[in-house]
Structures are given as C-alpha cells and as structure tokens.
Amino acid sequence: MSRLLCLILLSLGLAQSAVAEESGDRVSAYLTQKFGIAKEKAEKISDAVQSAASKYSLPPALLLAIISIESRFKEKAKGANGATGLMQVVPSAHRGLLRNVKDLTEPTANIEVGSAILYGYMRSANGDMNAALKSYGGSQAYAQKVSLRAGDFANVAPHPGLAKQSNAQADTCDARVSARCADTFGNRTSALAAPSARETGSNEAAPGAQTSAALAAPSN
C-alpha cells in the first residue's frame, strides 16, 4: 500500500511537471505576441520565470508583471541607482546576492536575483506580498500597479501552488518506506518543493527601490 502511494505521488509530480511545461509554452507565446519578443528570447525568459517562481514559491504572473513594469522585457535596461536588467536589480543594495553573478543583464541570472530579493522582502514581512512589493518598488502605488498588471498574465501563467501540496503529500508516506519515497518523489519533483531559507542578503540601503535590510534567500 505504501509503495502504491509513492507511485501515485510520483505520477502526480510528473503530471504537475507537464502542466508547468505547458504553462511555459503559453507564457513564451504570449510574450512574443504581446511584446514582440523573439521566440528564443521569450522561451528563455519564460523558463527563468517558471524556475524562479517554483523555487521561491512566487506567482509567475507576479514576476512577469514586475518585469513588464521595470524593463518591458528589455534585458539591457538601465535605471536609477544602477538598476539593471529585466527586474531592475540595484547592485549596491544586494551585493550579497550577486557574489556569483557575472552578468546581471543575463535574463536567467537577473530573474533569479530579482526573485530572491522579492522572496526576502516577503519573508521579512511575514508573508505580506503587498508589503514586499512596496519594498521592492519603493511605494504603495508601485505595489498596486504590479498587482493590477499581474492580472494581465494570470491566464497564461497561473500559480500552480504545488510546493505545500507536494510537501503535505510526501508526509503521508508510511514510515517504513519514507526514505525511499522521499528520494523517489523528491528527485523527480525537486523543482516544485519549497526552499529552506537562510539570511544571505545585504543590510546596506540605497536610495529608491529595493532598500529593505536582511533578505532571506533559499540555501543552494
């Protein structure tokens, strides 16, 4: 019975992965149609958003909304205070998160760091996403703008909400086979799992957006 349960969970994980892949296809097609982004670039952005959203348990539509507002999907965008790339990351405010980043204009790296920043603000605000967005953009008006814009992406990039579900399902495995089940289930669906957290952010503040202290980012 326990083995059957693990097989069911594994099948569910594979099905969820297929859903995520289909969602990624919809996102890239939407970016190409709506913003005129080349197909290859749109696919890269979509993959990076899906990966970061899963890793940090953030809605993909919210990350896409931030990118559209911050840079309109222009990876070389530059802003005030050195804000760089798709999510307009401010390097001086987040040196701790940039130690291993060679090129902040590279879409995957930029979205990873930007998502880690937002995740840290959310943890500091005890899960309050509105407060996290306010910290990210510097104002309540910005938070409201992102929330509204996220609605434009909600249909093509729904939030799967799989992390907690997967963890709860894994906990039901019989103790006699828990190690085997966790290994099987975890290896196939690790991208869906919620990350463990540790404090890695910088306490340095810079003018404008992204100035909150002590960000929490998942351990590698």
Image (tube, rainbow, N blue to C red):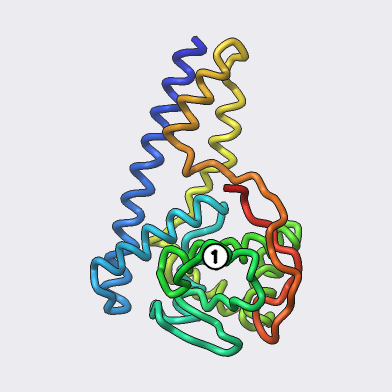
Give residue 17's quadrant in the image: top left
Return the residue at label 1. Answer: 113
Front one among 151 and 1: 1
> Would residue 42 appear left or right of 50 to someone viewing this image?
left
Q: Nearer the viewer, residue 103 or 142?
A: 103
Q: Position of residue 201 (x, y in %)?
A: 69, 63
Task: Inspect the image, locate mark 1, and give the three-letter code of the amino acid beneath it.
Answer: Val
Image x and y of residue 14, in percent: 37, 35
Q: Residue furthest bottom?
A: 80
Q: Which quadrant holds residue 47?
A: bottom left
Q: Is residue 122 visible?
A: no
Residue 97, horizontal then vertical, whole percent: 60, 64
- Crowding at label 1, few (<14), some or many (≥20) Cα neighbours within 10 Å? many
Left or right of residue 18: residue 186: right
- Determine whether the residue tagged by mark 1 lies in a helix, strand or loop: helix
Q: Residue at x 49, y 9 (%)?
A: 1
Instruction: Using the image, determine if residue 4 lies above or below residue 63.
Output: above
Residue 166, relative to residue 74: is it above or below?
above
Q: Identify which residue, 219 or 125, lies in the foreground.
A: 219
Q: Residue placed at 50% from the left, 65% from the top?
A: 101
User: Which residue shows up at 55% across the image and 75% down it?
Assistant: 89
The total number of labels drawn is 1
Q: Position of residue 87 (x, y in %)?
A: 50, 74
> Can residue 129 be seen here?
yes
Farthest residue in the left direction? 39
- Which residue is depicted at the point 51% across and 18% down? 180
